[in-house]
Amino acid sequence: MEARLARLNEELTSVLHDLRTTHTTELSSSQKTPQDPSSLPSPTPNLETSVELLGQASTLLTPPLHTLIDGIFAFTISSALHAAVQYSIPSLLSTHGPLPIPKLASLTAPPLSPSALTQTLQLLASHGIFSYDPATRVMANTPASELLKTEHWTRWELWAKLYPGRFDGIFQRLGASLPEAEGRSAMHIACGAEASEGLYSLLGRQRWAGEFHETLGAGARASAPGLVGGYPWKEVEKLGSLCDLGGGNGELVATLLEANEGLRGLVLEIGKTADFARGNFAEGGKFAGVGSRAEVVEGDFFKEVPQFPVYTCRWTFHNWDDEKAGVILRRAREGLVKVEGARMLIVDAVVTMGRMGRPAMYGSAVMMSGAKGGKERTEDEWRALCEGSGWRVEKIYRLRTCLTCIIDLRPE
């Protein structure tokens, strides 16, 4: 084994050298997150395969105790990330360039302990978030920490604030929510709520509800270029109109109307959320530019949906178990206009095992903590769910610079 590992080490050393020198421009380009869909990086299947294979090798070779310790102390990473964003470390390093830790600590408000800051950022640097030179004690941004700048258009810093800060107490109740006989989610238990209260009603009562919705809105904007550039929307535009089921504040419809001038869109929502979406499309609202082509209708997709040739549904199915998700699919199938090319497009995660699949697994854990039965689904689970509800999966589009896919359904 030692001889084989020696050859592996030699090859990896050579590959790392090449990536850091000969291929540095290509690698940098593949990691960009542009706002313009036409500037999206080209697909890199070999890069993703390399990440998965290296991840498998790391899992196989890492001593079990080290793997266990990583799991036990994973909370320290998210807490350190929260602290780094709290004190605007990524923005400071972007403005001033690489800095010695004492200088960096002096620029924060209030000034931080250089020793404590070193310990905090070293932990993050060991995971590729910031880079640290022990010899000079100089800290610098990496492509990952650049995404956390306050001024970065994706606003990922909001996620680093919300989830470590607000969901810590909720996840402490995860174990209590797992028994089959317990009808409440971890969030319901943490908030002292009845199992019958809906997730978004419960969220709406939290003092940080505005923070939650702002974060989700930022996530929608961050995924917009990949969403627009990763699917043949001109096919949808030819059909004239679409209905977004559970369309929230109207962000998805607005994004698609802005990119497709011949398209009209309807947002189906309930109660106060529908009123909020109407305000966004009204004169003076943030989506007023496409307001003349948009409509908001109050309704319940568990009961009936308006007749349309295209339905979209983003970040909704993971709120429900298969029984309730199947109802949504059947209602959409009943309302689908019978025209060539009619379809339903689900924008959601597809769970895979391995390093690249971890974001979907994190999302599944968060959904389980908020709604009993809530989960992300594997490709096989998506196919079984959809094919049992009058649909077939035509294709799954894996979007660049996004954590979600578009699951393209056609009527059976």
Image (spheres, rainbow, N blue to C red):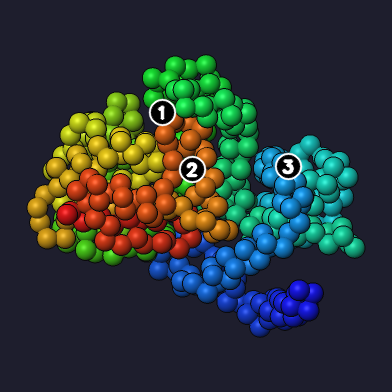
Q: Amino acid at mark 2?
A: Ser
* Residue name at image x 47 percent, y 27 percent: 180
In the picture of the structure, the residue carrying the numbered disc 3 is 73
Residue at mark 2 to residue at mark 3: CA–CA distance: 20 Å
* Residue name at image x 24 percent, y 55 percent: 392
- Give the left or right position of residue 8, taking residue 261 as reference: right
* Residue name at image x 78 percent, y 79 percent: 3
Sequence-first tag of 2 and 3: 3
Sequence-first tag of 1 and 2: 1
* Residue name at image x 88 percent, y 45 percent: 115
Image quadrant in which the N terminus is located: bottom right
Is the residue 332 above or below the residue 271 in the image?
below
In the picture of the structure, the residue carrying the numbered disc 2 is 364
Specify few, some or many for label 2: CA neighbours under 10 Å numbering under 14, 14-19, or 20 or more: some
Residue at mark 3 to residue at mark 1: CA–CA distance: 31 Å
Q: Which mark is residue 200?
A: 1
Q: Amino acid at mark 1?
A: Tyr
- From the top left corner, tell me how far across and down residue 371 is, in percent: 44, 31
- Give the left or right position of residue 280, taking residue 261 as reference: right
Element class at badge 2: helix
